[in-house]
Amino acid sequence: MAVESKALDDPKSSLNYQWIIFTLLSSSHLLMAMCYYSWGPLAPTLKGVLDISNSQFGYIISLMYLAMVVVSAPSGFLVDHYGVKRMLFLSCFLVGSGMSLLAAKPSYTILVATALLMGIGYGMINQITTKGFVYWFEAQKRGTVMGIKQMGVTIGGSLIGIYIPFFSIYMGWQHAVLVLGLIVVAVSLICLGLYKEKPTEDIDLDQAGDTANSKLQKTSLREVMMEPKLVLATILASLLAFCQACLTSFLVLYAQENFIINNIAAGSMLTIAMVGGTFGRIILGMVSDRMLKGDRAMPLAIIGLIGVLSSFPLLFIGSNTALWILYIIAAFLGISFMGWNSLAMVLVAEMVGPDKVGSVLGIVFMAAWGAMVAGPALFGRLVDMGGYAAAWLMVMILSGLACAGFLFMARHYKPQS
């Protein structure tokens, strides 16, 4: 670990520096999310410039997801070995470089290189930020700060939909992409200069007793990953990740094909779902921290229940359903399937403690992103075979299983006191 600055020798100074750490981690994730979601707004332009098919463009997105899956576990080990500062710099630098590269003379090779750089960089960020928050924030704050930080994902997805069209008009799409890429590279350098690995040991951040299962910190990684509750948490997180990928991939298409609404109204359903996920992450994080005194499993069970209740109407509602009803359903789908991940990360992190959190989260997210790769393909197959009702029924069942699993964990996983 790097030697800490003298400014951090005082516990009070360490508490104040929490919020600098929070700003660095949260702003990095938001800007990287803007790059990550930029493929959607750029799709019409890139397809037109390169004259590529939908399938060819889809291969690029799949390649980025594949890179995220492959890098997830190794990057977790690297975060634990080299620390948050170096890996945060590397993660931001790769994503920013990939985005900047996209501004070069466009070619399919450039798209491939960009997808690989972005996938590798973005595949690290959850492990990095979670480890940073576990070191820097007390258990009583983690659910809330993680929820706020994860807002950056949905906010970034919303901002890029405005940024690319607006700035493309005034400076051209390549310059718009280059500016965003260079900003992310600059942030990587700022993080390298300002980030401190952890506060002074004198500050009481519950690091010694970070979990009721603190014995896991003394065992090998293989033994940790075989712990039944951690295996269960990984499976349940993967179920919700599967449902999330189905929602983001097919909600707009489902709305366009099944209801008497225009394309703008259909597209706005996904925006509303993302807004629902944004608020869900904060509210449920605060409920976990303050009302449930650090219980992470019960709010996740509530998330699963909301997923069941919001998926159920999609099995039978007709084409003349009022738009306001569709928007309400979309909001609750977002609260559930876009709002689960921050609490799931805190749950896993507190099970294993700060020393192994990067490695373990890397493996957990490898499973979750693998589920996200499989989800849209299976959902689409069910639509082709039996219609959307069959596909949404699958989502409802999986959400119900996640609810039941987290209820079981709530009874057997004791939150920190």
Image: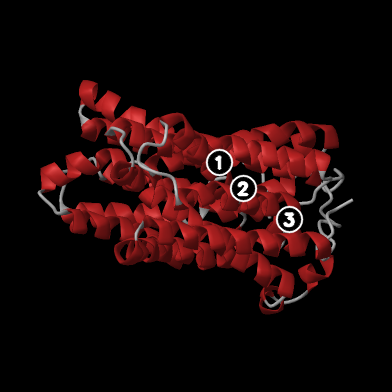
The residue that appears at 26% across and 56% down in the rendered structure is 58
Checking the image for residue 297, the label placed there is 3
Of labels 1 and 2, earlier in sequence is 2
Q: Earlier in the sequence, mark 3 or mark 2?
A: 3
- At label 1, counting other C-alpha atoms closer than 10 Å, the crowd grade (few under 14, some 14-19, many 20 or more) is many
Residue under the point 28% across and 25% down: 167
Q: Residue at x 17, y 54 (%)?
A: 108
Is residue 3 visible in the rendered structure shown here?
no
Quadrant of the image occupied by residue 381:
bottom left
Is 233 situated above or below 197? Answer: below
Q: Which amino acid type is marked by label 2?
A: Ile
Q: CA distance from mark 3 to mark 2?
A: 14 Å
**Whether label 1 touches label 2, CB < 8 Å:** yes
Query: At which x and y percent is residue 316?
Result: 45, 50
Q: Residue under label 1, please give it.
A: 332
Q: Amino acid at mark 1?
A: Phe
Crowd tier of the residue under label 2, counting other residues whose Cα lies within 10 Å: few below 14, some 14–19, many 20 or above:
many
> Left or right: where does residue 222 sit relative to residue 319?
right
Q: Which mark is residue 197?
A: none
Occupied quadrant, residue 156: top left
The picture places residue 346, in percent across and down from the top left corner, at: 69, 52
Q: Give the residue at the far left of this rendering.
A: 51
Identify which amino acid the numbered label 3 is placed on.
Ala
Classify residue 82 as left or right of residue 117: right
- Report the label total: 3
Reading the image, the residue beneath label 2 is 306
Mark 3 secondary-structure assignment: helix
Regarding mark 1 in the picture, which secondary structure is present there?
Answer: helix
Q: What distance separates the C-alpha of mark 3 from that of mark 1?
A: 19 Å
Task: Identify the element where label 2 is drawn.
Answer: helix
